[in-house]
């Protein structure tokens, strides 16, 4: 049986590759970029010429292992096992092939990092998410990231970032200021097969948000990678600079990258598909499974923060009063809670039932973050963890003793605190495995020391440029 499945998978892949090669010829694509996202959440790649694509699709492109241990200035960090010796391969997933609407003559694919013997490499973030999705089987995961970003007038000159507009949150004028850009971004995303759902100018000058429709978990993570690449490339073409940094400059409003998700039972026919997070008789519309999932999230939140708020700059955003979810608690439509239960939409109560994890930002590697969130939620389901009652008040309005009485903890205040929490979390460390579990904390500790040495101004600007 396994062989038959493998054969049919291989022939599907071969068909896919034939289709890609034909598209490359027909659309005169000279370079196909092979992208991956590193542990610092930076998308990097190497490109393959038209004539070499056929060979490289299966063999992949060689990449020095040490590239995974580069910091935001591309300086290699001293992580054991990531030195001058050793290679992995960038092997593309043909289902992610996209002719880039903003770069005529170029296409791109997202890659897995594969060992030279052909097996998945133990530090690969995308493989981590694939394994987490498998761990949820027979249930499937639907998810959507929603990234906020800041539009600035131009590529920042040293030490300066000037926001594009001074409009208010949801201000009607804000739509006019960005109309050409926003419509071209929506079109470019649709051309890449990504469904745009909503758009608005948001809180704070220059802040914008274009949300994507939920999708299966791997595609949701892939889509947010395309979203950031597209939003930034088009901004430059419009003479602007888009940054997804958590806080790009002093006084700017924080940019989050919240994650909405639900678990589904897709067995049976299309009409039988069932959102297993939904339960009509419950006050919040949540099933027992969903509540246990929330219990798992709350139990692992301090460690999840290390993966979601993945940079030194993240902790300028993850603060009370920023609607970023700085407290470990959950509640319906509670925007200060790390886990928000959105009230259900009339007319689609069951399908719209989902859980929102607010603590992530765009410095996170979306594959590591979503994979870890699934492992945390599964731990809650498997051990029937009780999240307790929802918090229907602003935690900032409760006295410290009342917060303590209700078990509402403040989440880590720095990347250092969060990385310590990650290393103490046996469930997530075991899910990450020894290689990721060694690389990630070492890289983050090196970032902390580097940013500390370089100073605040450098930190703001570096994050504004890199993300
Ligand atoms: N900007 C907030 C954050 O950093 C989120 C605001 C909202 O709820 O949309 O997470
Ligand atoms: Mg928002």
Image (cartoon, grey):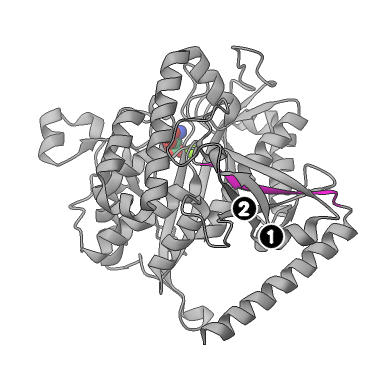
Instruction: Tell me where residue 201 sits by quadrant.
Output: top right
- Residue 238 drawn at (x, y percent): 76, 30
Q: What residue is pinned by disc 1?
A: 59
Q: Residue at x 33, y 46 (%)?
A: 339
Q: Is residue 178 left or right of residue 123?
A: right
Mark 2 C-beta to ligand 1 under 8 Å: no
Q: What residue is pinned by disc 2?
A: 89
- Residue 284 drawn at (x, y percent): 29, 57
Q: Residue at x 69, y 21 (%)?
A: 155
For label 1, the SS is: helix
Crowding at dot 1, Cα within 10 Å, few <14 / some 14-19 / many 20+, comes out as some
Q: Earlier in the sequence, mark 2 or mark 1?
A: 1
Q: Nearer the viewer, residue 139 or 268?
A: 139
Crowding at dot 2, Cα within 10 Å, few <14 / some 14-19 / many 20+, comes out as many
Q: Nearer the viewer, residue 177 or 153?
A: 153
- Residue 105 drawn at (x, y percent): 85, 47
Residue 24 position (above or below residue 73): below
Q: Residue at x 53, y 33 (%)?
A: 70
Q: Nearer the viewer, residue 180 or 448?
A: 448
Residue 133 position (above or below residue 371): below
Main secondary structure of the magenta stretch: strand
For label 2, the SS is: strand
Q: Which residues are magenta?
A: 29-38
Q: CA distance from mark 2 to mark 1?
A: 8 Å
Whether residue 33 appears in magenta in the rendering, the answer is yes
């Amino acid at each position: 049986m396994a062989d038959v499945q493998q054969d049919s998978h291989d022939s599907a892949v071969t068909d896919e590759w034939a289709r890609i090669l034909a598209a490359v010829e027909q659309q005169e694509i000279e370079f196909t970029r092979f992208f991956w996202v590193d542990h610092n959440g930076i998308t990097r790649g190497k490109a393959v010429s038209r004539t070499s694509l056929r060979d490289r699709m299966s063999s992949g492109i060689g990449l020095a292992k040490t590239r995974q241990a580069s910091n935001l200035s591309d300086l290699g960090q001293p992580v054991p096992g990531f030195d001058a010796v050793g290679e992995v391969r960038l092997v593309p997933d043909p289902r992610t092939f996209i002719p880039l609407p903003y770069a005529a003559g170029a296409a791109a694919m997202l890659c897995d990092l594969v060992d030279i013997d052909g097996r998945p490499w133990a530090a690969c973030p995308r493989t981590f998410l694939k394994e987490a999705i498998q761990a949820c089987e027979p249930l499937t995961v639907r998810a959507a990231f929603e990234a906020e970003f800041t539009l600035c007038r131009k590529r920042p000159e040293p030490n300066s970032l000037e926001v594009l507009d001074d409009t208010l949150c949801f201000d009607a004028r804000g739509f006019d200021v960005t109309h050409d850009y926003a419509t071209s971004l929506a079109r470019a995303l649709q051309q890449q097969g990504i469904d745009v759902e909503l758009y608005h100018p948001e809180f704070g000058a220059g802040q914008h948000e274009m949300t994507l429709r939920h999708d299966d978990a791997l595609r949701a993570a892939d889509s947010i990678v395309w979203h950031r690449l597209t939003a930034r490339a088009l901004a430059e073409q419009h003479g602007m600079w888009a940054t997804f940094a958590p806080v790009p400059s002093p006084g700017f409003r924080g940019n989050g990258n919240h994650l909405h998700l639900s678990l589904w039972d897709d067995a049976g026919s299309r009409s039988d598909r069932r959102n297993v997070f939904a339960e009509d008789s419950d006050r919040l519309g949540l099933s027992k499974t969903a509540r246990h999932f929330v219990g798992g999230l709350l139990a692992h939140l301090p460690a999840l923060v290390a993966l979601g708020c993945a940079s030194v700059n993240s902790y300028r955003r993850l603060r009370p009063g920023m609607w970023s979810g700085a407290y470990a608690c959950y509640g319906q439509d509670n925007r200060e809670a790390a886990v928000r239960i959105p009230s259900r939409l009339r007319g689609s109560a069951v399908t719209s039932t989902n859980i929102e994890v607010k603590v992530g930002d765009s410095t996170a590697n979306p594959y590591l973050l979503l994979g870890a969130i699934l492992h945390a939620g599964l731990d809650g389901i498997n051990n029937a963890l009780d999240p307790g009652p929802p918090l229907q008040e602003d935690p900032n309005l409760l006295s410290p003793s009342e917060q303590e009485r209700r078990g509402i903890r403040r989440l880590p205040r720095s990347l250092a605190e969060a990385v310590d929490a990650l290393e103490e979390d046996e469930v997530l460390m075991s899910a990450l495995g020894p290689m990721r579990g060694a690389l990630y904390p070492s890289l983050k500790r090196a970032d902390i020391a580097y940013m500390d040495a370089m100073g605040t101004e450098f930190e703001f600007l570096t994050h504004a440029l890199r993300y």
